[in-house]
Amino acid sequence: MADEEKTETGEGAAAPKKGKLKLIIAVVGFLVVLGAGAGGWFFFMRGHGEEQHAEAPPPKPPSFVDVPDMLVNLVGAPGERVQYLKLKLVLEVKEEKQVEAIKPALPRVTDLFQTYMRELRPSDLNGSAGLFRLKEELTKRVNLALAPNQVNAVLFKEVVIQ
């Protein structure tokens, strides 16, 4: 019986220690979460209304150069009906001063475009992927012709395949 009493007291003494340990861990955890929340609020919300952010100037709108309308016949198999491609294009450049530098070279650009497009087949222009490839190829060619001036993009105003 004496052994039973010692065992009960030993177990009874260990139980309050485990309860206190759990309580201490819970309080410390709560304080850590509370501190992290307060730190986050202080870091992100502190002086929000007082700061003056420097506003970036609005970006300059691009300038555009009209390319003369083009009409070319497409390559077809012998005996097939001849198909034509009619394009109205615009070149997009970053600054207005580039427009004046590009205008004298437009005959060269038109010649490069027509020479390239006369080698196209109607199947090369199928779907939006075909037009995207055409746009990319024309952009590459115009940038080679106008170097050191750069064109951002070749934009289609009108595309007709007949």
Image (cartoon, helix red, strand yellow):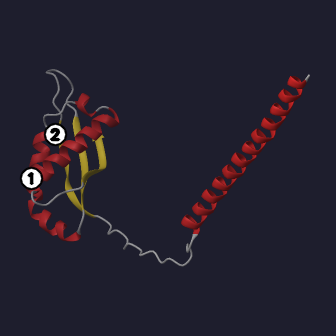
- The residue sitting at 18% across, 66% down in the picture is 99
Which of 113 and 145 lies nearest the eye of the viewer? 145
Relative to 156, say whether 47 is above or below.
below
SS class of the residue under badge 2? Answer: helix
Q: How crowded is mark 2: few (under 14 residues within 10 Å), some or many (20 or more)?
A: some
The answer to whether residue 18 is left or right of residue 80 is right
Residue situated in front as seen by the camera: 77 or 18: 18
| Direction from residue 57 to residue 30 in the image, left or right | right
In the rendered structure, which amino acid carries the disc numbered 2?
Met
x and y, in percent, of residue 90 in the image: 25, 56
Identity of the residue drawn at 76% across and 45% down: 20
> Which residue type does callout 1 highlight?
Ala
Which part of the image, by quadrant, shows the C terminus? top left
Can residue 161 be seen by looking at this rendering?
Answer: no
Q: Which residue is drawn at 63% across and 62% down?
A: 38
The residue that mark 1 highlights is: 145
The residue labelled by disc 2 is 117
